[in-house]
Amino acid sequence: MKIFDGIRNIPYEGPKSKDPLSFRYYNPNEIVDGRSMSEHLKFAVAFWHTFNYDGSDPFGMGTMQRPWSKVSNPMDLALIKVDALFEFCEKLNVEYFCFHDRDIAPEGGTLRETNKNLDVVVEHIKDHMKTSKIKPLWVTANMFSNPRYVHGAATSPNADVFAYAAAQVKKALEIAKEVGASNYVFWGGREGYETLLNTDMEFELENMARFLHMAVDYAKKIGFDGQFLIEPKPKEPTKHQYDFDAASAIAFLQKYDLSEHFKLNIEANHATLAGHTFQHELRYARINGKLGSIDANQGDLLLGWDVDRFPTNIYETTLAMYEVIKNGGLHSGGLNFDAKVRRGSFTPEDLFKAHIAAIDAFAAGWKIAHKVIGDGVIDEFVSKRYSSYKRGIGKDIVSGKMNFETLEKYVIDKDKIGNISGMQEELESLLNYYILNFQS
Ligand code: XUL
Ligand code: CO
């Protein structure tokens, strides 16, 4: 039985297509640098937003019209959504999906019962995977929705909660291994605090490190060899989250001797919530060898919370893909659409159209970035800008020959220090040129 009746497989029809149910820029089989676009751009569908989000917000109830809306038995519903996932990905030609443990199966009265529910759904996923090339990009555990996690999970002041979270991640890692996930993500949903009046920050951070070491040990024990990823976010749901941004997550990993086991999953809307650009976070992760994967979405600069819009801004996707290409790709990672359709976009067709728009925006951004890098214009400019370090005094600074005293001697009688223009507007205009002309 087909769930998304009336929706055909989404074809590539090229840039002139006016059909919103076709790709304009994403041609999965097009070969670039010896690899297909689908290998370069590993897109993933986020189970939670696409199959669970009902459109409710703090002011109103759900709006989404879904083919499974009338299914009331929770296990039947869980299984039908997995069928929907595979059909959706196949029709979209997307090879990956991501999920939290609690997205795919309902909780029971005890963890034992919950795990039994999970086993049934995981079997169903594995059955689909036998006849499909669709696979999980990453798996994670939801340790923020249930009231037991009101004060956090690994950073909860309650040791029973720490234990429960550990058992939950143990099971999620077993699932990740079973379904062959390429990565395992930790997003610290409530790992943070509301007020320091009731919080031992240092102890909470130590506990978070203890927890992650246990996860690393258990993955090793069961032979799960996927990449561990931390997903930074500065706030929401807690006022201050510990994995604030790439820089704080990297410092944490270094301090607690976890660095070799983790990379980062950088999310666009989390970057802007932290007061950074998406590109800043990608760059910071990349230059530290920590760019592992991307949660591809888009915030709204007029709204100060995590709106998770589908990413359609080509300027942003171009700069993001610039970092990805410079990173040599995302390796085990990919581009997960951690994005939800707007509340007013409630038809099943909107789900397809939103993914198509985002896939095309990233495919175009990738092509543009590829051209910019290939032409070497930005690299050339940047390299010239720092060329004073390639000769004379600059070369001596870099090679470690100089100190404060010798540098003082060098400048003390100089009457003029010259600078060259940063040419920002010219470069922005150049980028516009590439964006507007990338197809010619
Ligand atoms: C929340 C968020 C999560 C993580 C996975 O802002 O991004 O969905 O991606 O837990
Ligand atoms: Co995310």
Image (cartoon, rainbow, N blue to C red):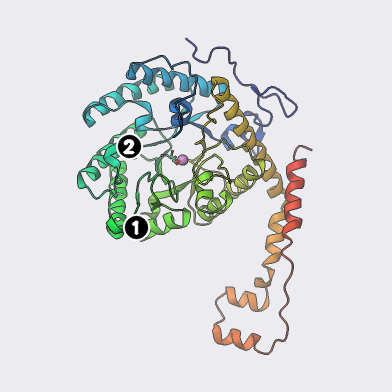
Q: Percent position (x, y) of residue 416?
A: 73, 83
Residue that mark 1 sits on: 257
Nearest to the observer: residue 40 or residue 147: 147
Check the image and name the residue furthest to the front: 59
Pinpoint residue 194: horizontal percent, then vertical percent: 35, 52
Q: CA distance from mark 2 to mark 1?
A: 21 Å
Mark with earlier residue (2, 1): 2
Residue at x-position 26% and y-position 39%: 148
Q: Quadrant of ligand 1?
A: top left
Toward the viewer: 127 or 310? Answer: 310
Position above or below: 99 against 386: above
Question: Nearest the camera: 398 or 92?
Answer: 92
Quick check: can you spot residue 415?
yes
Residue annotated with mark 2: 173
For residue 412, above or below residue 343: below
> Is there CB contact under 8 Å for labels 2 and 1?
no
The x and y percentages for residue 117 are 29, 24
The amino acid type of the residue labelled 2 equals Leu
- In the rendered view, does 25 fall on the left or right side of 323? right
Point out the residue furthest to the right here. Answer: 440
Residue closest to the far top: 1
The answer to whether residue 267 of the structure is visible from this angle is: no
Q: Which mark is residue 182?
A: none
Looking at the picture, tell me which residue is in the foreground, 410 or 104. Answer: 104
Residue pictured at 70% horizontal, 55% vertical = 378
For the residue with label 2, is its CB less than 8 Å from the closest atom of ligand 1? no
Q: Secondary structure at mark 1?
A: loop
Q: Residue at x 41, y 59 (%)?
A: 251
Left or right of 69 on screen, residue 8: right
When the figure is inspected, residue 21 is found, relative to residue 178, above or below; the finding is: above
